[in-house]
Image: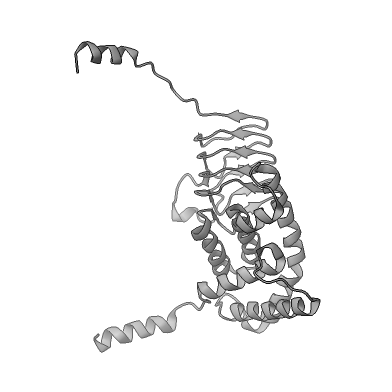
Amino acid sequence: MEKKFLQELFDEHRRAESCPSPEQVVAFFNRLLGLLFPEYSNTRYRSIEKLEKLDAGLKREFCDVLKKCSECPGTHVEELAEAFWSELPNIKAGLEHDIQAIYEGDPAAKSRTEVVRTYPGFYAITSYRIAHYLHGKGYRLLSRMITENAHSRTGIDIHPGAKIGQHFCIDHGTGIVIGETTVIGDYVKIYQGVTLGALSVRKEDAAVKRHPTIGDHAVIYAGATILGGETDVGSHSVIGGNVWLTESVPEWTRVTYVARQENRSALKNSVQDSGE
């Protein structure tokens, strides 16, 4: 490799934004998940002292992650970690509602442990809840690393900037996209393949609301696509499978895709008469 090109690469390395590795972030997140939910942990802690040791170690690990973020003021890392830790009880309490929503929303779910340990929706929602807190504090890159890990693992793409209410149920999950400025109310259920997206992808619209608002108790079935920042789905509405929606619907509305059925008997008789 020529020295001039190598020098250019070196200069890029020096200018590159500092951030922790995805492996470090994901490892921290999974251990934190195991602390908050013993069903997810690979270790059973038989004494409070050992759990305290895990808690303290994870907090130090979080500080190490923050120190590698260029968007984090290095002098306040311990304060930032302390603030995040003080929010964890509220995040866990919210996730308990999500677990209950998935358990109640899927007849196949037989236990809480099954939801925590096996459901992709739970992993994606947990990633979102934690990432959303960090996103609100300005750690946009760190929060995206957490949700993109969930995306690659579950096929569920939730932007950490979206606002999602309590008791949120994702059934099956794969193929769901929830955009940055989406607003979702409480007690909403979404099936696989749903897109809550933007009508356009113009860069100049980055600061405006581009994604829909979903009211409380709405249900959105598989494959539905709802687009646009001015598109509101009223509370208690049901959006059927494969519906393409770009305008608002009032509350208590059912929108369905009507499949067209065509009788092909005449074609069948024609083929038989021709001897083909």
Residue sticking out furthest to the bottom: 3
Q: Where does the image place residue 131, in percent across and percent down from the top left?
A: 62, 63
Asked which quadrant contains residue 127, the reply is: bottom right
When the figure is inspected, residue 247 is found, relative to residue 56, above or below; the finding is above
Q: Nearer the viewer, residue 118 or 99?
A: 118
> Image quadrant for the N terminus?
bottom left
> Image quadrant for the C terminus?
top left
Q: How has the structure been colored for display?
A: one colour
Q: Is residue 61 left or right of residue 210?
A: right
On the question of residue 148 being in view, the answer is yes
Q: Where does the image place residue 100, in percent across and percent down from the top left?
A: 72, 49
Residue at image x 58%, y 66%?
143
Q: Nearer the viewer, residue 256 or 170?
A: 170
Residue at image x 63%, y 29%?
253
Q: Nearer the viewer, residue 178 or 119?
A: 119
When the figure is inspected, residue 63 is found, relative to residue 164, above or below; the finding is below
Q: How many marks?
A: 0
On the question of residue 37 being in view, the answer is no
Q: Where does the image place residue 58, in percent across and percent down from the top left?
A: 67, 77
Residue sticking out furthest to the left: 275
Residue at image x 19%, y 13%?
274
When the figure is inspected, residue 11 is found, relative to residue 242, above or below; the finding is below
Q: Where does the image place residue 60, in percent across and percent down from the top left?
A: 67, 81
Residue at image x 74%, y 67%?
87
Residue sticking out furthest to the right: 48
